[in-house]
Image (cartoon, coloured by chain):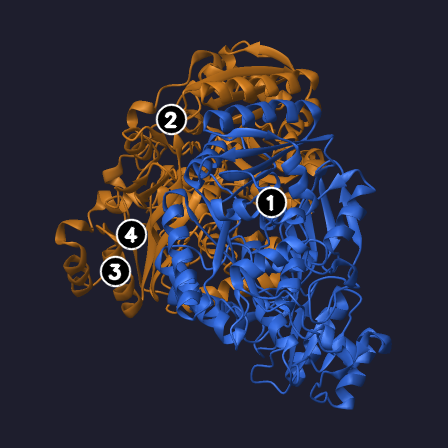
Chain colours: A blue, B orange
Amino acid sequence: MVWDAWGVPSGHAPLPEKIRTLLAQVFGVSGEPVARRDAGDVPLRACALAAARLAELSTMVGADHVSIEHRDRLLHAGGKSTPDLLRRRAAGPQDAPDAVVFPADHDQVLAVLARCAEHGIAVVPFGGGTSVVGGVDPARGDLAAVIALDLRRLDTLAEVDPISLTATLGAGVTGPQAEELLAAHGLSLGHFPQSFEFASIGGFAATRSSGQASAGYGRFDDMIQRLRIATPAGTLEIGRAPASAAGPDLRELFAGSEGTLGVITEVTLRVHPRPETVAYQAWSFPDFTTGAAALRTLVQTGAAPTVLRLSDEAETGLNLARAGDVGGTAVTGCLAITTVEGTLAHVEARGAEVNTLLAAAGGTALGERPARDWEHGRFSAPYLRDALLDVGILCETLETATNWSNLAQLKAAVTAALTDSLGTQGTPALVLCHISHTYPTGASLYFTVVAKQAEDPLAQWGRAKQAAGDAIIAAGGTITHHHAVGEDHRPWLSAEIGEVGVRVLRAVKQAVDPAGILNPGKLIP
Amino acid sequence: MVWDAWGVPSGHAPLPEKIRTLLAQVFGVSGEPVARRDAGDVPLRACALAAARLAELSTMVGADHVSIEHRDRLLHAGGKSTPDLLRRRAAGPQDAPDAVVFPADHDQVLAVLARCAEHGIAVVPFGGGTSVVGGVDPARGDLAAVIALDLRRLDTLAEVDPISLTATLGAGVTGPQAEELLAAHGLSLGHFPQSFEFASIGGFAATRSSGQASAGYGRFDDMIQRLRIATPAGTLEIGRAPASAAGPDLRELFAGSEGTLGVITEVTLRVHPRPETVAYQAWSFPDFTTGAAALRTLVQTGAAPTVLRLSDEAETGLNLARAGDVGGTAVTGCLAITTVEGTLAHVEARGAEVNTLLAAAGGTALGERPARDWEHGRFSAPYLRDALLDVGILCETLETATNWSNLAQLKAAVTAALTDSLGTQGTPALVLCHISHTYPTGASLYFTVVAKQAEDPLAQWGRAKQAAGDAIIAAGGTITHHHAVGEDHRPWLSAEIGEVGVRVLRAVKQAVDPAGILNPGKLIP
């Protein structure tokens, strides 16, 4: 990815005319992008690692795989939240790891961790670098130096079991690489978060990622059969069977550990045959409440499709669910998208069940087109955010989840918190929302916030984020449904899991990482 | 339950004539039951708790709720494995807790734990007492005394959310009580393990129970939305949303913790509307391999029914899947049972999909009757075991799980280990097997072993169990799919989760139970 924005250069484009018109109308901004700085001009502090330490690291992973180059350090300077991108766009020096290390395999990771523990060097495990919560910030904690441990060379499909439908993938395999490697075996993982194009298998596991087809294929943590983890205390291999009663499920302790308890080097995942067919169907519901009740009926009946999402009135009105056509002709009411994937017979049976239930619940079928449009543009929203940031617009997302009975209250509370905070700051906000992950007992809420940037947009967003996080906790939601904790949500983790829960995490950390080298300052309060 | 056998007295009956005939033919036993000892004659060692300690406990929970009565101590002397029942039937003293304490609520549990930690008194959390792995044995560890903490008074339905379909139940609520409490709201939990009639909500959670309708409603751990746990370090309340990315899922650390990390006092569970209808269908498959492949197709297609099980040729031949008719007219090949529950429309749609797939996979439909027979007799097998033990037959079960591709190999390895061990001991065994829990990536295997008792049946079974456990680990299975670890599977836990995994469990234990009072000798090696 480019250092100061999302994705690849070819993904970036000037804002379409209709969006510029919209921005001028709503926020009074001209829509002229400001120039960004050249990567080579960005000052970094000197590498804090002694030559002897670098030589040791080179011995372990090969001299070609330890870098203190300006470009490599800058590319590992953090993730892709809006605050991250604002910091990159601001003047002044950029924090960065002292070196970037590219191990080839599990044993090299183990060796690097052991040596770093010995010398007190912090280690930030680095997959696709797509964190939007500060999860890969080059923080040193109390230590003198920090390396980014880039796992891209762990990029193989180690094993496929076509009977059990499992596949073992290296932590550094990206979303598209995983699909390509599996396609050669007629298989698919079906994990499509918005970070899909760049994020990695290890990152998905370490952050409890959830993809757009979660209604059909589950969250990433649901897919995990086995984890191989390198820790300063040694190797952990967990998951001997699809399910077990042999004590606590330690997979669930390391899934979501965000690099603070170990480095996930290999993941065995549930996969599925590439679908014979995909049925697309879009729907309109008169309002969000009716639409949410319809989604609830589907999942509580045991008739979930593969993709199931619902935009609220504001998001539907802006047409943001169809990223390729923002500001274009909108659906009235609330737009819902469904796809059903699988064998021909299964898609026919499930598709019929879905369509009957949604129609009975007040939905109006809109045909395939809006669903295909959504799929076509589904990874492009982060590029749009970059273009907005460039013209002085603040744009960020945040997400939560709760039980169905609490969904409307939580949505209202978060919307009010964001609207009030940004309004009070003199920058009235648009707050859009959708449901993208559903469960029998509840659903996620994903908010997109757009406002004019204030003079200090970092402080401006900081206040809004604080208000939203407090509102989420007060209204009974989880502080994050699929973005993870990192640095940004850490202040709320005690409220989420309680003081005894925090004590448990600290005890596990102490057991596997007594020197405290693993991703300091993330997750654990 | 009665102290020296399964269940209630009314469930016990002499062996039917056709089983006695079978036993005489196969094992050469007469089928005459031996008399069991009278509970009142069983010597227990004196209560090791000082009067001051008992007085303190009485202050906390009320004098009526602390018992050192012989009968209460005997009824909390352990679980219901075959070794447990053989020990009860043997002459000599019976180990038992020094006192039985019946707290009324979470705060009383918390207070009792704090006081016991202070005075070094071991605490064995006690639900239904149905453990078959030594999970409720009155072990003291290094401590001078042990109490059983019987949770039966935590027996309320605290809250129902009819929109989100969740219910909050006290840890002491039994299976039938849960169904009755929920039925008043038109709801059902749908968790029906063989221990259903006696086991408790807290026990289900603490042992990762899995019920006979797991294909439709999931394992018990899948149903858990929120746990309330009392530990010597304080209270833990975890689970703010149906799913979350807020770090490790600590619910999964305390589910399966078997009373060693805390006492689960309240569980919020996913429930469902009482089904409008249930479709029953039994099937015959020519052999186990064909049947297993058929079950695999169902779950991998996303078309699982509610109940899905398959008996192997030996179990089908003995008709053991239809407990009410053991030895009666058997189905040929391998018997499979399916039920599909839900709304009328869903049962119609899913039932059609299931029937089409099973027929295409080589199944012959046998109609409803054998499926209804199975359901009718599904909780009676433990009573049959008691009758067999009484006539000098050894009968025990064990279970494991693995990926589909490894299922046949694991089944053969465990069958051979049991057959060889008992054959070598001069007591040739019948080994029967079924699949009762299925996943997209694999399935469980449940073995029933029947042999003539040797002179020392405890030692006899000990050798067979050791051989089976070693074979499970060597063949890549989990040491337990749904019976938990307790004392009996503890020797294999290091092989299951590795030394680093064990270190993690010990660290968590140290953090929440530094005095080591909670269920000593269970789970953690």
| Sequence-first tag of 4 and 3 | 3
Real-space CA distance between mark 4 and mark 2, rounded to the nearest whole angstrom: 33 Å
Secondary structure at badge 3 equals helix
Secondary structure at badge 4 equals strand
Task: Write down the residue under mark 1.
Answer: B469
Q: Residue at x 69, y 67 (%)?
A: A5
From the top left corner, tell me how far across and down residue A523 is, in percent.
52, 68
Amino acid marked by disc 2: Arg
| Chain letter for mark 4 | B
Asked whether the beta carbons under mark 4 and mark 3 sit within 8 Å of each other, the answer is yes
| Sequence-first tag of 1 and 2 | 2
Q: Nearer the viewer, mark 4 or mark 1?
A: 4
| Sequence-first tag of 4 and 1 | 4
Secondary structure at badge 2 equals loop
Question: Which mark identifies residue B301?
Answer: none
Task: Write down the residue under mark 2.
Answer: B274
Would you say B99 lies left or right of A417 here? left
